[in-house]
Image (cartoon, rainbow, N blue to C red):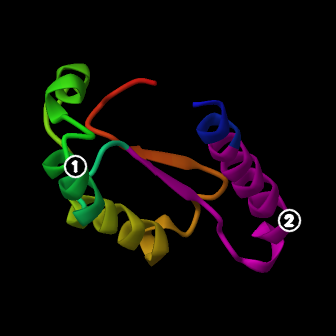
Amino acid sequence: MAHYSAAKGGVISLTKALARELAGGGTTVNTIAPSVCETPQMLRAIEANEFSLDHVTPLIPIPRAGRPDEIAGACAFLASDDAAYITGQVLAVNGGIYM
């Protein structure tokens, strides 16, 4: 998990740095941090017995995997005029899991 943590930390740091650099020109920069999500890759991993939701869902207050449309909705919000004053943020779309 060290490689995942390092990459995630890099994305968060880059988001915050770009947000500061680009804010004066009216550009906002944010990132989405999803939890486990129903994707074709996840479904293949379940079918191959490489992954089980049974181990993950008890850790999530909303005990299920997220759906791609839920992640897309968060992205659409951040890209909308309603989010024009939001920058440098990490939006966790994760069912309430704390990691």
The answer to whether residue 38 shows anywhere in this view is no
Residue 99 vs residue 18: left or right? left
Query: Who is closer to the viewer here, 39 or 27?
Result: 39
Quarter-of-image position of residue 63: top left
Residues at badges 1 and 2 in contact (C-beta under 8 Å)? no
Residue 72 vs residue 26: left or right? left
Which of discs 1 and 2 lies nearer the camera? The answer is 1
Rendered residue at 25%/50% (across/down): 45
Label 1 environment density (alpha carbons within 10 Å; few <14, some 14–19, many ≥20): some
Question: What residue type is disc 1 on?
Answer: Gly
* SS assignment at label 2: helix
The answer to whether residue 11 shows anywhere in this view is yes
Rendered residue at 67%/46% (across/down): 7
Label 2 environment density (alpha carbons within 10 Å; few <14, some 14–19, many ≥20): few
The overriding secondary structure of the stretch rendered in magenta is: helix
* SS assignment at label 1: loop
State which region is magenta. Answer: 7-34
The label number, if any, that marks residue 7 in the structure image: none
Which residue is the site of mark 1? 66
Q: Residue 87 at what x, y percent from top left?
A: 63, 58
Rendered residue at 55%/57% (across/down): 31
Q: Is residue 84 above or below residue 49?
A: below
Question: What residue type is disc 2 on?
Answer: Glu
Q: Is residue 9 above or below residue 79?
A: above
Rendered residue at 14%/38% (across/down): 64
Q: Residue 77 at what x, y percent from top left?
A: 38, 68
Which residue is the site of mark 2? 21
